Amino acid sequence: MPRYGKITKEIYGELLAVTGPGGVTADEEALDNYAWDQAGRVWGHMPEAVVKPADTEQVSKIMKIASRERIPVTPRGAGSGLNGGAVPRAGGIVLSLERMNRILEIDPVNRVAVVEPGVVTNDLCRAAAERGFLYAGYPMSTETSFIGGNFATNAGGGKVIRYGSTRRHILGAEVVLPSGEVLELGGRYRKDTWGYSLLSLLVGSEGTLAVATKLIVNLEPKPGRTVNLLACYPTVEQLVESVAKVIGSGRRIISCEFMDRKLVKYTTEYLGCTLPEQERSEAYLLIQLEGDTDEQLEDGYETVGKICLAGGAFEVFVAESRTDSAAMWNVRQNGLEGMRAKDPYACSSGDLMVPLSAVPEMLRRIKKIAEEWNVEIGIIAHIGDGNIHPIPLKPDGMSPEEWARYAEDFFAALIREAIALGGVGSGEHGVGHVKQKILLENKTPAELEVLRGVKKAFDPLGIMNPGKMFSPLEED
Amino acid sequence: MPRYGKITKEIYGELLAVTGPGGVTADEEALDNYAWDQAGRVWGHMPEAVVKPADTEQVSKIMKIASRERIPVTPRGAGSGLNGGAVPRAGGIVLSLERMNRILEIDPVNRVAVVEPGVVTNDLCRAAAERGFLYAGYPMSTETSFIGGNFATNAGGGKVIRYGSTRRHILGAEVVLPSGEVLELGGRYRKDTWGYSLLSLLVGSEGTLAVATKLIVNLEPKPGRTVNLLACYPTVEQLVESVAKVIGSGRRIISCEFMDRKLVKYTTEYLGCTLPEQERSEAYLLIQLEGDTDEQLEDGYETVGKICLAGGAFEVFVAESRTDSAAMWNVRQNGLEGMRAKDPYACSSGDLMVPLSAVPEMLRRIKKIAEEWNVEIGIIAHIGDGNIHPIPLKPDGMSPEEWARYAEDFFAALIREAIALGGVGSGEHGVGHVKQKILLENKTPAELEVLRGVKKAFDPLGIMNPGKMFSPLEED
């Protein structure tokens, strides 16, 4: 197999002829914006060119050129990923979908929206709400992330406990193969046993198999009214014991989120606010409940509130207004920014996934390992799903480059514990290249062989997002 | 590539040594039971041997022998499939999972059940209910089908509208590859972006990629109480117009099922019962609603009842008792048996899937084509999903062999219409070999190439269930 091709002047011209003026750039300063994602700059790598197609036909033509010349192509949404999934490790083309950002249709009878991949998730949420529907994919980065990136990472977020991850909401997709061929998968219908579900497989494949150019997504009927509760606990152990009871209460729980003391401290400092009982709380549960009527809502928050208090919470606050609710969620949604305000090298790729029954033990092991590694951490978690995000700060005096390796090893140690407890190393952030090493260590040779066979079925030349997940990076 | 291997006396002995006495048979009479499924005898084919492993290790050893000798292996559950998916078209081994039928665990904290593939779906439903949970996979064949078969076909059924098809309920699986290697996929957790989702891909792969030997399935919290409504309509058109309004009512609709006049006529004759207004009804809607309280239930059936009456229903009957409900559902669940009582060659592989908005037009086209083809049909449908099952009777004087070809062509004609309306040829029954020809006609060369590449990644020797879906049958 030859090495990857380079973007010559001729190829640059050819790409520009496909996209038209402004669609291709190789300007060093402009390229830098596309060299890294929210994993952090130290995990970045410069592309040779950024190409911004305006439609499917252009994507197809670009992929044909890339295949012909064996040029690596890394699809990119908003760049809000947390594991370097959109980083062009082998150089080549960053294929930015930012210009393909139209909501093409809201179809109320079939309860779907048809969108281009560059639509900001929140714009889709708003457009759906205006028509009386809910788009239930809800990553924490909803204000910035693109729906195409949600598709590529099978994004989770704050509503998974009720509505499931992104895969559940993707009913159809138009995708372009590395060869430039266009496939139409699924559609405006809700069941499909018409051949293997390539669609299910593509969700979460991190741009290593194909480029999505159009998505048909499920819309949920407009939800009932919601209410938010904030429960303040003296110990993490007591909080965790409440969680299974809250989930099992039979009430309509939309979210069940966890924040520990450190995270709340730094985030409230960053935001200039406080949460109730902040001095004496070790951890918080933020719970969102749904109901159709006042009575249901009241029954919901009374039941859940009692569970929390019986479990040892100091207090349970019920948000009385939109403003109260927004204040509670503001801290949760800005947890990463809060940690980054304290230390710009705070690493957010941590994304441990364990069975609910293993959450208490996992939290104990995280604390223990953080101490052993001499790393200060804050923790946020979609705790109702068993999905835990420890966010470590760079130790003083360590260089950013040392930290990149150190943090990878730190997470590898945590992931080994998660796997030992019956879990995996990522519930929603994906693998990218930050977690590649530990993924390879963890998968059996038999599974890796199948995974690589699947990759080859889509991408025989190995040009799609090389060096990610389980695919090796061919070194020059 | 050599032809498939045959089961010699030596290999027979080797298989028997794996399973122990009673685990292998080549007795002609016994084999006949494993030669066909509910597609019908005319789509059957005799195996050379039936092998019944007792555990995963035995499955692995059997697959190693089969790989070494290139003997075809067709996994089989209850044989309740409707498209010949479990028919051993190339002979070889039928791998019956009937002895692996234990419910290994109900895990209430993680809300999962761990089961072997040979568990009857209804046994799982009952075991879950005893612990206060719901297993929400609910194929119409729940009394006979195995959970392993539900996995293999991504079974749908009567509760999809609320809970989704089987894929949504499979959280983990132990599977044996054709090579005999065992993979552990997923687990007792609910989010996973740790490499491609081979698990999602395997659901619905009809035993062409691997054999599932253990499944971890999602349990839902115990549902609220339900109530059943039967609405009787003078015309199909009026009924169909009500459906989108019922679905969009915001009430908790669990099922929305359709039965036409012919199907009700033959099925009530078979069961020796009647449905209300049977003389003047062209079609029925059977709707199940959920609520937590009497008030919610009442609000639900009043709202939905009014929608149906406003849409032209003669009457809407609310089941007052369990007996009433059972009587309504009895007709729905025995629709196929009712048609088969009229004509043992009634073909049940029909499984059209269209967007909800296309249901009225699809029903018109089904009637038109049935007339053109001179075929008498009854229709049942998961109409709330847009999933329609026309069941044709063999015309008088046609031989069963002619009928097998005629019915395939009849369904191919219908499937072309479903595809033209934005749908596909199967929502839940799968492809098997009965619909292979029309599948191949419908998929693009680019998609077929990817599908075959995926198949090769799992099954390089082509021994898993040959001649199904898009895989050709190698002729001797």
Image (cartoon, coloured by chain):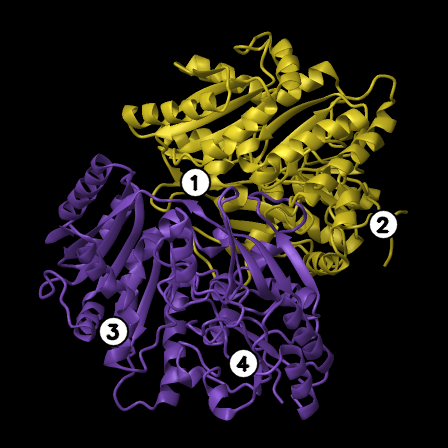
Chain colours: A purple, B yellow
Of discs 2 and 4, which sits in the foreground?
4
Can you see residue B78? no
Circle 2 SS class: loop
Can you see residue B341? yes
Which mark is drawn over residue A253?
Answer: none
Subunit under mark 2: B
At x 53%, y 71%, the residue is A97
Q: Earlier in the sequence, mark 1 or mark 2?
A: 1
Q: Are marks 4 and 1 in contact (CB under 8 Å)?
A: no
Of discs 2 and 3, which sits in the foreground?
3
Circle 3 SS class: helix
Which mark is drawn over residue B105?
Answer: 1
In space, the residues marked 2 and 3 are separated at their CA atoms by 62 Å
Of discs 4 and 1, which sits in the foreground?
4
The image shows residue B377, relative to residue B449, as above or below, that is above
Subunit under mark 1: B
Q: Residues within 10 Å of mark 2 (few under 14, many from 20)?
A: few
Q: Are marks 1 and 3 in contact (CB under 8 Å)?
A: no
Subunit under mark 4: A
On-image quarter of the N terminus of chain A: bottom right
Q: Are marks 2 and 3 in contact (CB under 8 Å)?
A: no
Which mark is drawn over residue B474?
Answer: 2
The image shows residue A219, relative to residue A366, as above or below, that is above
Circle 4 SS class: loop
Subunit under mark 3: A
State the residue position of label 3.
A338
Same chain for marks 2 and 3? no
Q: Amino acid at mark 4?
A: Pro
Among all residues in the image, which is located at the extreme right? B476
Same chain for marks 4 and 3? yes
Circle 1 SS class: strand
Same chain for marks 1 and 3? no
